[in-house]
């Protein structure tokens, strides 16, 4: 087995850090979700992962009212259960969801081989649709249909 180069090692460390940072974000969102759930006596979630939908129903302790909230994951976004549930609850409570949805990650699509020696990856970068090739050149001139 060939030993990794320093560059490969550093890239692996970067990937590990990104993963750990993401897990911290999801853990904190899970804590927010738990806190929000404490405001309800009865709760029910209907989750359709394939469609990226979460429907929340719950009896609000303070008002006694049945509250409903629904969220649908965008086609270009990666479905994350904790985010879907938290957004649905916040919608039911008529709360701002911006701080939660900023953590939604975009899907990456392998759309074929091209520049360099690798695949082209399409996704979003700072809200702009981009194509990235195997050597990480970014172009926002391409539009995905």
Image: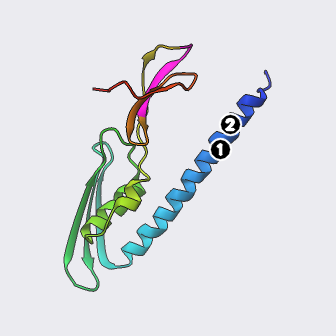
Residue 15 spot, x, y in % from top left: 63, 40
Pick whichever, 39 or 123, lies toward us: 123
Query: 10 Å neighbourhood of mark 2: few (<14), some, or many (≥20)?
Result: few
Above or below residue 139? Residue 24 is: below
Q: For residue 45, which quarter of the picture? A: bottom left
Residue 100 spot, x, y in % from top left: 40, 59
Q: Are marks 1 and 2 in contact (CB under 8 Å)?
A: yes
Element marked by disc 2: helix
Residue 108 spot, x, y in % from top left: 43, 33
Asked if residue 144 is among those painted magenta in the image, a careful observer would answer no
Note whether residue 57 is visible. no
Note whether residue 41 is visible. yes
* Residue depicted at 50% across the width and 14% down the height: 115
Q: Which residues are magenta?
A: 116-123
* Outermost residue toward the front in this view: 141
Pick whichever, 44 or 25, lies toward us: 25
Residue that carries the numbered disc 1 in the rendered image: 16
Above or below residue 74? Residue 131 is: above
For the N terminus, the quadrant is top right
Element marked by disc 1: helix
Residue that carries the numbered disc 2 in the rendered image: 12
Above or below residue 139? Residue 77 is: below
């Amino acid at each position: 087995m060939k030993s990794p180069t320093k560059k490969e090692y550093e890239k692996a460390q970067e990937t590990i850090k990104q993963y750990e940072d993401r897990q911290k974000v999801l853990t904190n969102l899970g804590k927010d979700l738990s806190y929000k759930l404490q405001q309800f006596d009865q709760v029910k979630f209907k989750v359709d992962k394939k469609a990226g939908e979460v429907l929340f129903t719950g009896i609000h302790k303070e008002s006694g009212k049945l509250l409903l909230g629904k969220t649908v994951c965008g086609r270009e976004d990666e479905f994350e259960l904790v985010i879907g549930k938290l957004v649905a609850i916040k919608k039911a409570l008529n709360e701002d969801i911006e701080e939660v949805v900023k953590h939604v990650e975009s899907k990456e699509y392998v759309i074929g081989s091209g520049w360099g020696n690798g695949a082209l990856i399409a996704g979003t970068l700072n809200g702009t649709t981009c194509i990235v090739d195997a050597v990480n050149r970014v172009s926002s001139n391409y539009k995905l249909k």
